[in-house]
Amino acid sequence: MALAPLACLPFARLARLASLCIALLCAATSAQAETRDIIARLANAKFPVVKQVIEDLAAAGDPTVAPFLRKLRAGKVYWRKSDRAVFIAEREKRDYALFDPITGAKVDQVGRRAAKKVRVNNAIRSAIDAALAGLTLSSPKVETRLAAAKQLFADRDASALPALTAALAREKDPTVKTAFEDARAAILATSTAATPSERVKAIARLGERGGSDSLNALSAVDAKAPADVLAAKESAIAEIKRSLAVWGAAENIWQGVSLGSVLLLAAIGLAITFGVMGVINMAHGELVMLGAYTTFAVQEVIRVSAPALFDVSLLIAAPLAFLVAGGVGVAIERGVCRFLYGRPLETLLATWGVSLILQQLVRSIFGPNNREVGNPSWMSGAFELGEMTITYNRLWILIFALAVFALLLGLMKRTPLGLQMRAVTQNRAMAADMGVRTGWVDAMTFGLGAGVAGLAGVALSQIDNVSPNLGQSYIVDSFMVVVFGGAGNLWGALAGAFTLGVANKFLEPYAGAVLGKILVLVFIILFIQKRPRGLFAIRGRAVES
């Protein structure tokens, strides 16, 4: 007798489990039946009814209707004329295949005249977007909920407010919760159904949030709103505009620094060559181009032979570009420039001829069209900093330019070659009398400057088109940086590059890109009249004479 209750216990549990399953099944069936009843109202419905159906589906909170809403937005929802049933329809030759709006199972196939499309317009599409955003508020994925919050912030559809409020109450992730609160503030600020106090609090939150999207939301506040709402709106807009002005200046500075890093890479090799040897090397831009094409060639070999190494392709290309451009630079100095020292005009013409030869050589080998150089994964994408968007490739180029500058500075200050280069720069005759092989120093200096130009080409291949004309875009700016900063001075090249880069970016919004460059050139001409040796003049007996 004692065993009877124990024997019955599993059956009791099974009975409770069965009753629970039956209850859940009934609830699911009831919810599905309710959803079908709402969808059935779409048959031969006018636009206001269609919009109301969408709002009712969103309010029900059933995520299974999301595919149906997407089909409705795409114009693929039809109703059958014979019984006014609503289906998802797909064209099959001259007929329509009809699918269940909930399960997606194929139900029927009818002729084109047996079914009629549920019409949608832009207002309906906006309502669907808002409904889809509301339905994804409960997604288990954080990124999905964030995307839904951003969509609701942009749409500001008051019909999504109940679902958003419910999602906000159960949200645990702080980032998503903040996004939900911002979306709720955007909806309340523009909703005429909200109380004035709610709208004022929402507007204040948008003002604290800042950003151009908050400004757009505040601009949508009705001009007929209560006086305290309008006053809060004007105050918030003024605050956001002040913040945007500060971020705009910061973005101009960042863009100028980014441009300056490119100019520094392109000009720093020229500063070494021009400062030590006094050679106006018009082929410097083509040495930059050779570095870019070396990068392209390395990536092509890696794509074919070892695709897994693509992310380190730039690390492989950088030393090779330095060697290729540096070797060509030594050949130019030994083959052309050393016979023309003391004749700057002839040196200029000769190196210009070399630049044309190098351009034609590259066209013959690689063709005249632009070549694609890919970004490794660590240089792709961007991140937000306040109202600024900073791309990883520009950030890495800035770091690379500063690293090259630091290495060159160390080479000039801490190595025998650097000491000899500085000696030849300050007094060539005395350096020769002291046993310095000035011809060897000239060749190594030209090779070093050319190698740095090759490194500039590696960096530029990530942000510009790789073509035979790549170097021509930077040669004039490079000379301006060298002349402005002081020939032969690395610190002058650094200061000149970043100064001209920032000045260009601040002038472009007002004067345009071309006129901005002209104004910078005029400024440099006037500056050189006052300081002919640039910002940082090199001192020594030879250079002072």
Image (spheres, grey):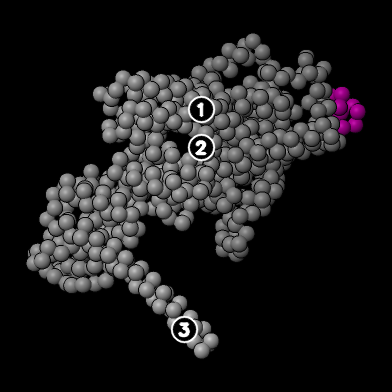
As measured in the structure, the alpha-carbon distance from the residue carrying label 3 to the one carrying label 1 is: 73 Å
Q: Measuring 82% from the left and 31% from the top, which residue is drawn there?
A: 413
- The quadrant of the picture occupied by the C terminus is top right
Q: Earlier in the sequence, mark 3 or mark 2?
A: 3
Q: Which amino acid does label 3 sit on?
A: Cys
Give the magenta range: 429-438
Q: Where is mark 3, residue-wise?
A: 8
As measured in the structure, the alpha-carbon distance from the residue carrying label 3 to the one carrying label 2 is: 68 Å
Q: Where is mark 1, residue-wise?
A: 247
Left or right position of 10 against 484: left
Label 3 environment density (alpha carbons within 10 Å; few <14, some 14–19, many ≥20): few
Where is residue 175 drawn, in percent x and y?
A: 51, 44
Q: What element carries label 3?
A: helix
Q: Measuring 10% from the left and 66% from the top, which residue is drawn there?
A: 83
Where is residue 338 drawn, in percent x and y?
A: 73, 34
Q: Which of 157 and 122 is in front in this view?
A: 157
Q: Is 177 situated above or below 29?
A: above
Q: Measuring 51% from the left and 48% from the top, which residue is drawn there?
A: 172
Q: What residue type is labelled 2?
A: Thr
Q: Nearer the viewer, mark 3 or mark 1?
A: 3
Where is residue 342 drawn, in percent x and y?
A: 72, 25
Q: Which mark is residue 389?
A: 2
Q: Which of marks 2 and 1 is nearer the N terminus?
A: 1
Which residue ends up furthest to the right in the rendered image?
Answer: 434
Left or right position of 184 against 82: right
Left or right position of 370 against 490: left
As measured in the structure, the alpha-carbon distance from the residue carrying label 2 to the one carrying label 1 is: 11 Å
- In the rendered structure, does residue 437 fall within the stretch colored magenta? yes
Q: Nearer the viewer, residue 434 or 383?
A: 383
Label 2 environment density (alpha carbons within 10 Å; few <14, some 14–19, many ≥20): few
